[in-house]
Image (spheres, helix red, strand yellow):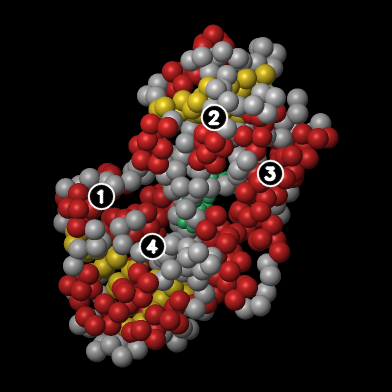
Amino acid sequence: MRICMVGTGYVGLVSGAGFAEMGNDVVCVDIDKAKVQRLREGECPIFEPGLEELLARNIKARRLTFTDDTAAAVAGAQVVFVGVGTPPRSDGGADLSAVDKVAETVAANVQQETVLVLKSTVPVGTNARARRIVANAKHKVHVVSNPEFLKEGEAVNDFLRPDRVVLGCDADDTFARDIMERIYHPVCLDRNRIIWMAPASAELTKYVSNTMLAMRISFVNEIASLCEKVGADIHEVRHGVGSDVRIGPKFLYAGPGYGGSCFPKDVQALVHTAREHGLELDLAVSTHRVNERQKGFLARKLKSHTDGDLRGKRIALWGLTFKPRTDDVRESAALMLIDVLLTEGAEIVAHDPEGMQNARALYGDRIQLVEDQYDAAKDADALVLVTEWRQYQNPDFERLKTLLRRPLILDGRNIWSTYGLRKQGFVYEGVGVSK
Ligand code: UGA
């Protein structure tokens, strides 16, 4: 199958390389010429485990190419996937100009009956909007909604072994259905994994999935605060609650609030869509509000141990990314903490296995970044764990005790809550752990 993937962000690049891996002939398009050149040379623009190898293998096999010429790429394809950005507008809605542009280019350049697949996260009604744009094209253009559910850090595996593939398409559109079945068959040998539905339902499914997961996290973070007040332990509560098969154990981990490029944006976008239709989604609104409050949690804890005065305090941060196995710092809890610490006059020494370059681009020399995690702790008044990277799981606590000026540890992910650190002489605080 000749596939064109427009947009080489997370979704576009992983999907493009994934489709090539299944033997398709894939051309990935991006308007950024320099990025296209780097990709052609096999350079992976993001840190994503397994992606570099996937790109290299498929570029070498000539199944995967890159171009900045959208018109030509679209003209030669049987299927055009749209994986361009849909950034939030100031009113909370999504900016769809890049999606519109692709649909217009498809309408002007198709050389054969084509399927246009919307993979970007787009609000309900975008499928219908794209149909209007391609309605008068020289050849018939079928529009399918195919939201992506991959997680950063696990993206390659999620793409090649999906839990489900959601496809929104007219029930009688056999042309589009046959093509999409062929494309996804290799990763969905068990056909039940392909879920067909109306386009509007597919569009909504994406936002509802992310909002539901975000809602679990916000709820568990609220309960963590209650645990601290009543002398309970969030681990035990999570274990007890998550053992009910109707609830399940996943996405019930308390922490410094959810971040990344998806949950914060998508919760807001769902609220916005509902408001456009005269509905107030109270639970989604609260999910966002609770998360904003939670992102201030680590700063509040720190202040409670420094008599509210952080001036001149040297704070060590372990972890800057919004979660492990990515270099992405967007909407990370670390950013909120850094902003508060800088405003309050603290000194920051931070370490992250992959996120330091992106943090440097944001803060320059206002924060100190160190290559060795232990160097961050040297003479620090506190160590704050923000992201649960594996290399932080089991550090040398004796060494930390000699390095830290004050043995204060704030564990924002509860990875050390069972280590008995208080007995070892640390002032230890987790999230929802009162022991
Ligand atoms: C999320 C969804 O999980 C994907 O299914 C979806 O495709 C993606 O958004 C998207 O819309 O593109 P992602 O943003 O990569 O994926 O990250 P998650 O693993 O979902 O984590 C999001 C945030 O929630 C992180 O900051 C993480 O630390 C936090 N989290 C997660 C918790 O605080 N507690 C948990 O129990 C789980």
- Camera-near label (1 vs 2) is 2
3 or 2: tag closer to the N-terminus: 3
Read off the residue under disc 3. 221
Q: CA distance from mark 3 to mark 1?
A: 38 Å
Of marks 3 and 2, the one in the foreground? 2
Identify the mark nearer the N-term, 2 or 4: 4
Residue under label 4? 85
Q: Are circles 2 and 4 on residues that touch, CB within 8 Å? A: no
Q: Which sits in the foreground, 172 or 410?
A: 410
Identify the image quadrant of the N terminus.
Answer: bottom left
Q: Earlier in the sequence, mark 3 or mark 4?
A: 4
**Identity of the amino acid at label 3?**
Asn
Q: Is mark 3 within 8 Å of ligand 1?
A: yes
Q: Identify whether 191 is placed above or below 350.
A: below
- The local crowd at label 3, few if under 14, some if 14 to 19, many if 20 or more residues have their Cα within 10 Å, is many
Look at the image and tell me whether residue 63 can be seen: no
**Viewer-nearest of discs 2 and 4:** 2
Residue position for label 1? 55
In this rendered view, identify the residue nearer to me: 245 or 56: 56
Residue at the image position 48 percent from the left and 15 percent from the top: 378
Between the residue at mark 1 and the residue at mark 2, the CA separation in whole angstroms equals 44 Å
The residue to which callout 2 is attached is 345
Indicate the secondary structure of the residue bearing disc 3. Answer: helix
* CB-based contact (under 8 Å), mark 3 and mark 1: no
Report the Cα–Cα distance between label 3 and label 4: 30 Å
* Residue 205, above or below 337: below
Q: Residue at x 37, y 24 (%)?
A: 371
